[in-house]
Amino acid sequence: MTKAIYPGSFDPVTKGHLDIIIRSSKIMSHLTVTVLENPRKVATFDVEKRIKMLKLITGPYINVEVDYYKGLLIDYAQQQKVNIIIKGLRAISDFEFEFQMALVNQKLNPAIETLFMMTNSKYSYLSSSIVKEIAALGGDITSLVPPEVHNMIVSEFK
Ligand code: PNS
């Protein structure tokens, strides 16, 4: 069994996240998509909504489950007995910070590996912040988010 964790704040989930979920679920026997708090960000969507969105979009993928954890990613991975963390990488701008996080996590627990998956070029410009900015200003986010979560995201800004 090759199990992995795909962690993130998913605030909200985008088509870019879903692409990483689909691709990594094909190479892993089990994938847990876990909502974690990012201490550097103030979330717009509460945890329940983020979990609901992830459950809606991952429903068709039988080897994918959704979870939430409050605390360090590395502690969560250890508790779950999973030693692979998947991170999506969009651009060179993501690299420096993700590199630092991977090294810190490696320092905290060398048995846990971070694997980076390159974004699909279709979504290289996409981020949760961009989705929120467009939605907050009344723009059309149809092409940016999975259809199952579109209305939930739009209603958050009404
Ligand atoms: O989607 P994001 O916001 O880029 O995800 C970042 C996240 C939530 C994965 C990261 O902030 C995280 O791992 N948070 C849990 C706390 C932790 O373990 N931090 C790393 C050690 S400094």
Image: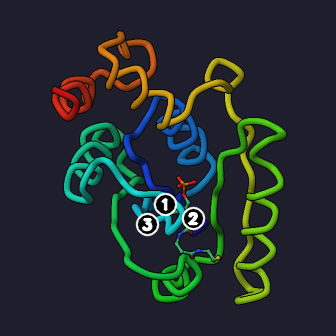
Q: Earlier in the sequence, mark 3 or mark 1?
A: 1
Mark 1 residue's CB less than 8 Å from ligand 1: no
Cα–Cα gap, marks 3 and 2: 15 Å
Q: Please give left or right for residue 129 compared with residue 44 in the image.
A: right
Marks 2 and 1 in Cβ contact (< 8 Å): yes
Cα–Cα gap, marks 2 and 1: 6 Å
Secondary structure at numbered mark 3: strand
Mark 2 residue's CB less than 8 Å from ligand 1: no
Tell me: residue 73, above or below residue 26: below
Q: Nearer the viewer, mark 3 or mark 1?
A: 3
Task: Identify which residue, 60 or 121, lies in the foreground.
Answer: 121
Q: Residue furthest front?
A: 137
Q: Which color scheme does this rendered protein use?
A: rainbow
Specify the quadrant that holds the N terminus: bottom right
Q: Nearer the viewer, mark 3 or mark 2?
A: 3
Q: Residues within 10 Å of mark 3 (few under 14, many from 20)?
A: some
Q: Which kind of residue does numbered mark 2 sit on? A: Ala
Q: Residue at x 40, y 39 (%)?
A: 13
Q: Position of residue 53 (x, y in %)?
A: 27, 42
Tell me the residue that label 3 is attached to: 36
Tell me: residue 8, above or below residue 137: below
Q: Position of residue 125 (x, y in %)?
A: 65, 24
Q: Earlier in the sequence, mark 3 or mark 2?
A: 2
Secondary structure at numbered mark 1: strand
Q: Which kind of residue does numbered mark 1 sit on? A: His
